[in-house]
Amino acid sequence: MTESRRYRGLLIGNADYPRDPHALPALEGPLTDIVELRNALADEQVGLFDSADLEVLPDYGIHDLRERVDELFTTATRGDVLLLYYSGHGQLDERGTLYLCARDTRTAALRATALSAIEINNILDGSPATSILIVLDCCYSGAFKGATPTTPVAGRGRYVLTSSRSTQLAQAATRPGQPSPFTRQLVRALRSAPSSAGAEHLTVVEIYRQVHHWMTADAVIAPQLRFAGEGDVALARRPAPPPAAPPQSAEPPSAPLTRAPPPEKPRPSGEPLARTDTLVVTFPPGTRHSGTRQQSASAQKPASPRGSASPSRSAERRTTGGREGRDAPPDAQEPARKPVPRRAILALGGVLVAGGATAVALLPGNDGGESGDGATKETASPTAKKVTVKAAGTLHCPDNVTSVAFSPDGPTVATNGGYGNARLWNMETEKNTRTLTNLGNVFSVAFSPDGEILATGGDNHKAELWNAKTGKRLHTLTGHSDAVASVAFSPQGKTLATGGHDGEVRLWNVATGKSAHTFQGLSKGAVSVAFSPDGGTLAIGIWDGRVLLANLKDKHSVVTLKGHTDAVTAVDFSPDGKTLATGSYDSSARLWNLETRKTLHTFTNRADAVSSVAFSPDSKLLAADGHGATARLWNVETGKPVQAFTKHTAPVRAVAFHPDRRILATGSDDKTVRLWRVS
């Protein structure tokens, strides 16, 4: 007796994470991903899914996700082919377990607020279905371990298709309305990949091989496929070949030939939507979405079965990558350029002058010749002072580096060091000298001016003060009700400032560990803080795009700098006290004249946010981090780029200058801190 095969799927896309926006920044791709994939799976020509059997879940909370995933697998029959797809943020806990994040996920409470691979496997084990495909487009997706089915059947089994390896970040969409690179290629394969000679269907393995080929042609991020069972499962029909062109007549006809269109065929109930139908995506109650996130299935129809059905877009990869023009074949349109990973952040390059201020486009790529040590000279003004950069060492860290700081009194470097840790390093020996534990997820590290104390802040809602020589905890600073995103010491070392997601900036007495003052009511939270060199002003970067300059002598006197349009994630004063640098999620960095409160230069980029900025000790250079594995140095006076650092193999997420030595540190998702001697 032949079993009937029914294809059913659950497509989950989570783009916004309002309960933990610092650790889980909003993503552009997931809501587009689930619409594009749904359209391909239910396409009348190539799809095997009925539209009624594909459920789309955009930005749902963890309770609803658990319920819908359980329902998909427990209500299945033995003959069903089940698909579970997820696009969004993936997180690993301290044991390496993968969690899929929901709208209400908090990284400090993953087990309670995210969907773990262990949970999913437990649900799968109880399902009667013997053909199951898990597709994950998220960071660390290769860490999903699909358990072996208890009764593998020929032609059936459990497949796990992931966008990256277990230790890799996934690539992210860089513009609203565009899909992520992996899902874009998956949709492209469903619509246009060739099947085996004479075969009527495309199988999971064939689609994986085609996506793997496209994704690894110019990048090191490789999709993964694991399979438990036997045989292969069809996932799409073989795309029909384009109709043959009619033979050309030697002479054109005297009048154009016309033919009546075929009668319109009514679409029966349950039949997949055509590409010109509108797809209505229902959002869960209480969520808000801007117009840029509204999706329609009327996205452009491919010109031929070989064309891509989804809009293409530039994407940042851990190393180099290609960019395709919108609605163009992969080998057409634009030349290759360096792309961008799932946590938004920066690539810098060319120059534009507008009015009195300079707007510098932060364009990815090597526009100069690269030296053997990974420093690339930029095209600069003929009168600009020459900057020489040499590699000075590499610190190999156990996890991604998102914060780095130098001790002023010696060769010590501090980094966040994996979940729950901060680490101290000797930059001369390149050895880890001390590990500070039980900290939660560390977001920020800073040394006191004398190098005796290290401050840390993270998602446990606390800041900690440590003896930097002995590693002894001096004080635990409690009072914030949400993550502490930034910590900074005053120039005298007597006060610590902390910026929190709870909308508060607190000033603490370093000697006693007591709160001395609180700035409250900051819209959506304070992301970054820095003291002026004279200690009289505190700069505060806010989620709503404002920069506040608080007079610490008169704490009710606050000046607002406006210009950024999104969260200000980095602030730094020049050592001479004349200039403030800011970096933002709006894809720009700015230099401000502190006397006039006016913008001096704006460094803009097409899509990526700036997360870290740092002045050189002489105030003449500014370092800015950048995804695309690139950081750059800028001439503060001219606003022009003078040097690029291209040795990293994953996004650069932190920069810092040693306060006395001409040493620059760049921290990266490739788990290294690279040290550069700048002269």
Image (cartoon, grey):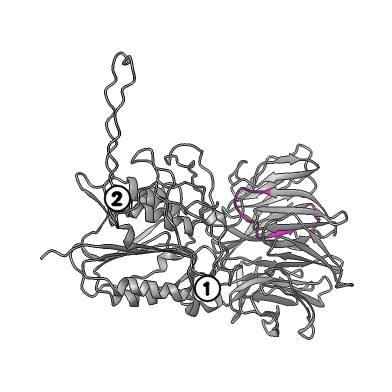
Image point 31% across, 72% down: which residue?
A: 73
Query: Which residue, given by chain and number where applicable, does mark 2 sit on?
Result: 267
Tell me the CA gap for discs 1 and 2: 40 Å
Figure quadrant of the N terminus: bottom left
Q: In terms of sequence position, does the residue under pointer 1 or pointer 2 come before the other?
A: 1
Q: Mark 1: which amino acid?
A: Thr
- Counting from the top left corner in percent of width and height, residue 398 is at 53, 70
Camera-side residue: 501 or 600? Answer: 501
Camera-side residue: 296 or 483? Answer: 296
Query: Which residue, given by chain and number where applicable, does mark 1 sit on?
Result: 105
Secondary structure under the numbered disc 2 in the rendered image: loop
Query: In the image, is residue 323 above or below residue 478?
Result: above
- Counting from the top left corner in percent of width and height, residue 278 is at 42, 51
Q: Is residue 563 left or right of residue 160?
A: right
- Residue 440 placement: quadrant: bottom right
Q: Is residue 76 visible?
A: yes
